[in-house]
Image (cartoon, rainbow, N blue to C red):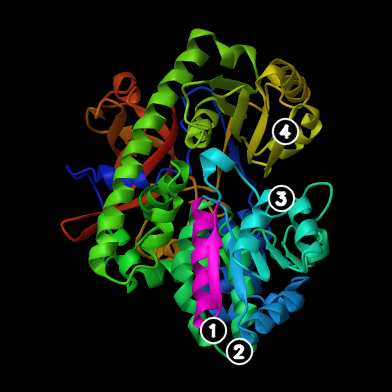
Amino acid sequence: MAWHFGPNLYCGLEAVMLECIVYIKCTMYETIWIYRPPEKNARVLSREIGQSIEFSQILINRGITTKDSAHRFLYGTLDDLLDPFLMTGMREAVDRLLQAIGQKEKVIIFGDYDVDGILSVVILSKALAYFGVDVSYFIPERLKKGYGIKEEYLEIVLERKATLVISVDCGMRAVAFASRAKEKGIDVIITDHHQPGSELPDALAVLNPVLSSANYPDKQLAGVGVAFKLIQGLFQKKGKEALLPHYLKLVSIATISDVVGLRGENRLFVKFGLKGLEEAANPGLVSLLESCGLRNRPVTVGDVGFRMGPRINAAGRLGMTDLAIQLFFVRSREEANNLAKKLNKLNSKRQKIEEGINRQAMDQIKRNSLDQKYRFLILGSEEWHRGVIGIVASKLKDAFYRPVILFAYENGKAFGSGRSIPEFSLIDCLSESKEYLVNYGGHILAIGCELSLDKMSAFKEAVNSYALSRLTDDVLRRRIKIDSKIDFNSINFSFLEAFSLLSPFGAGNPKPVFVTEAVQVVAEPKKLQGKHCKLIVKQNGKYFEALAWGRGDWADTLQKGDVINLCYSLQFSEYLGEEKLNLNLIDIKK
């Protein structure tokens, strides 16, 4: 592999843009740069693992402080996956699957309509079908039925004469459903990763690593990760462990798309799943890769997060989940290509809807100075599509660095989707205001909820009162955690070889953030597409091209000859078969 240093007229804009997901839009004056003090044991760890002190400091910044943990993080293999039977309920669940296989029972899988839920359904269906199980699935239509396993869905189970129900990426609040199923003699296995309600479903087994009773060391699994652990347990019992890597291609896509931390088992799922995508054989997966321009080349976390995941997600968001499910079950390339084209069209439609909602929401905020008046932004409209509002909420959260809930109003009801900053738990906030809600669920950083529109004013007042006591002005100041100060001369071949060991990057393992001081702008800044800024910079005789995503205004305020401090991550892009290294600017200070 060859890396290109120095200025290059080609900016690799698309490739650079795809990797920017983990960084927020910043301004020169509103951010705080936090320098982590050098750890004393960085020097010790450096000697133990044979890497530089700066590299060891990056590991320590991520909580990796020992030789053994560093080795697992940098060089981990699938042999490092945890024993699935460490999870409470796994033995009961696997024994019940073995019974279903032996007695040729009918099994139905209930899933969610996002990428995590869809691909969880796919991998578990394929695994059970491999052993001859008569398996079907049900995913509720997002816009009509909403989230979760409702009591009324038992009629579907009875109609299909299934004797075993398995949930994936949902089910923690299916108390009424599980109770009625038990009355009818139908066993239920819950696999989920969401926070529970006040009462757990009375199921045969509840597999959820976030439960304290689960006793499972890795708490960060996505729904697909929990489903995979169930498959792992089953395949171990059947002596088919050698087949497990085949499932990691889809597990990696769902894990990345659900934005869970890429540490522990998630890191292994993604690391080896991405490698597997380079040799994909499933017709649907091949067609999806080709439609994204990713066939027969290394696939990155950014490729999945910005190209593959959104196409699968678009089906669920726009009420056509079956298209995404079918893609992975068709056997002919012609059928697969047709489905991939349909998903492309749905994704384009989703993008247009999203852009419209984003424009309207930004206009409401700016016109009414809502970001100056409130620490928690809550907006809604009858015109907004509730399948897309979560994406827009995430963008607004990044733009204004505060929690956001957007609501779609329909027939006197308000359907909400929210996103939050790390310092504020959305699920705790909603729990404090649950008297106003018909339904709610989610995580610290993301929630969904429903309430009657006539309670919206009281809900807003309660939520903002809760936020006011917890979101101080200081909390709402953006902070950028710096991994290390380095000079451009430090960025050499050995540095980059070590850097590559840290990937895959994503949530829980962000790209390292560096600061280089006293850098000179050596060419007039360029504004790209009216909204991005490209700089050619130099320090100690070494040149780099730097791109500031979404900061076209910097091209107006900087000029050739300026000396600035750069905050950035490293960005690789490919041009004419050559891999080029750029600086992905996060912030600058004069």
**Answer yes or no: do the residues labelled 1 and 3 have beta carbons within 8 Å?**
no
Is residue 544 something one can see in this rendering? no
Residue sitting nearer the eye, 491 or 425: 425
Q: Position of residue 98 (x, y in %)?
A: 66, 83
Q: Which mark is residue 438?
A: 4
Q: Residue furthest bottom?
A: 239
Residue 124 highlighted magenta (yes or no): yes
Residue occupying the point 39% across, 68% down: 329
Reply yes or no: does residue 372 show up in magenta: no
Q: Is residue 308 visible?
A: yes
Residue under the point 46% across and 25% down: 27
Q: Which residue is mark 1?
A: 131
**Residue 43: percent from the left, percent from the top?**
62, 63
**Magenta-highlighted residues:** 114-139
Q: Are marks 1 and 2 in contact (CB under 8 Å)?
A: yes
Q: Regarding mark 2 in the picture, which secondary structure is present there?
A: helix
The residues bearing labels 1 and 4 have C-alpha atoms spaced at a distance of 41 Å
Q: Amino acid at mark 4?
A: Val
Q: Which numbered disc, 1 or 2, marks the residue that appears first in the sequence?
A: 1
Q: Which badge, 3 or 2, is on the more N-terminal residue?
A: 3
Q: Which residue is mark 3?
A: 151
Place residue 535 in its image quadrant.
top left
* Nearest to the observer: residue 421 or residue 243: 243
Would you call the spot at circle 1 few (<14 residues within 10 Å), some (14-19), or many (20 or more)?
A: some
In this rendering, the answer to whether 345 lies above or below 168 is above
Instruction: Please indicate whether residue 584 sits to the left or right of residue 267 in the image.
Output: left
Task: Calculate the distance from the C-alpha at mark 3 to the C-alpha at mark 4.
Answer: 15 Å
Q: Which comes before the other along the chain, label 1 or label 3?
A: 1
Report the Cα–Cα distance between label 1 and label 2.
9 Å
Q: Which residue type does callout 3 highlight?
A: Glu
